[in-house]
Structure formats: C-alpha cells, structure tokens
Image (cartoon, helix red, strand yellow):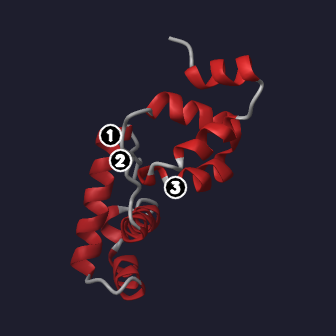
Amino acid sequence: MSNPLMQFKDSLGLSVKAVYLLLLQYDKYSYLPEIFDLVGESAMVKLLDRFAGLQIKFPTEGEILDVVRCLKIYSRLSKIQAGKRAPVIDELASDLDMTPLSVYDNFNRTKKELENRLGIGFGV
C-alpha cells in the first residue's frame, strides 16, 4: 500500500507540514510539531506511515540515565580480566553512588542482556 501522505503531497503540491498542523486539533497529537522539527519532513512522512494508529512511548530521563550507567559499567569492566576487576568495581561504586555488589550485579545483567539480545560479547 502506498503512503497516503505522499499521495496527498504529490497530488496537491502541499507540504506534509499542513497535515501535521491539522492533526494538532486533536490534543493527543500535541508533540507532533516538536518531532517534525527534529526529524524533518521526509522522516516525518515515514514515521506517520509506519506508526499510524499506534502509541509510541519514549523512555523517561531516569530510564535513559540508568541505561547510560549500565553501559558505563559494562564498558569499563569488560576490558578487564575477571580476577582483576575489584579495584575498578570499587571505583565505579564510589563514582556512581552504588555498592560494589550492585556494580558487579549490574555488569553481569548488562553483559548477559547484550550477549543474548545482540550477540555482543567480549573475549577476556
């Protein structure tokens, strides 16, 4: 099925911006202008075509920060052999206001998740 927004644009010669401006009359689409400004017209057409009728939920700032913390721990510890990680675990625990055990657990969870979902591993 061809993209109805592209048909609209091609047949009337109008910007897709007109479509999203009209969608603003529905309060539930109130973030479309910000998204449009960030991604541009071409990407907005693709987004609306691909996700029409679906709700999209973005992670909270806290969730993003948690993922960054997990990756920081993983990045630091994955470069070090298992028997030599203790000093770095202690340093990370201090820097991230965590216990050494929670840093270690976080590393193992992140490692397992990356290996299982993405096939990412390391050879130490």
Amino acid type, mark 1: Arg
Which residue, given by chain and number where applicable, does mark 1 sit on?
117
Foreground label between 1 and 3:
3
Query: Is residue 119 found left or right of 100 in the rendered image?
Result: right
Amino acid type, mark 2: Leu
**C-alpha gap between disc 3 and disc 2:** 32 Å
Residue at 65 percent of width and 22 percent of height: 8
Depth order, front residue of 90/31: 31
**C-alpha gap between disc 1 and disc 2:** 5 Å
Q: Position of residue 42 (x, y in %)?
A: 68, 34
Secondary structure at numbered mark 1: helix
Secondary structure at numbered mark 3: loop
Q: Position of residue 61 (x, y in %)?
A: 43, 69
Which residue, given by chain and number where applicable, does mark 2 sit on?
114
Labels in figure, total: 3
Label 1, residues with CA under 10 Å away: few <14, some 14-19, many ≥20: few
Depth order, front residue of 99/23: 23
Which residue, given by chain and number where applicable, does mark 3 sit on?
31
Q: Position of residue 86 (x, y in %)?
A: 32, 77
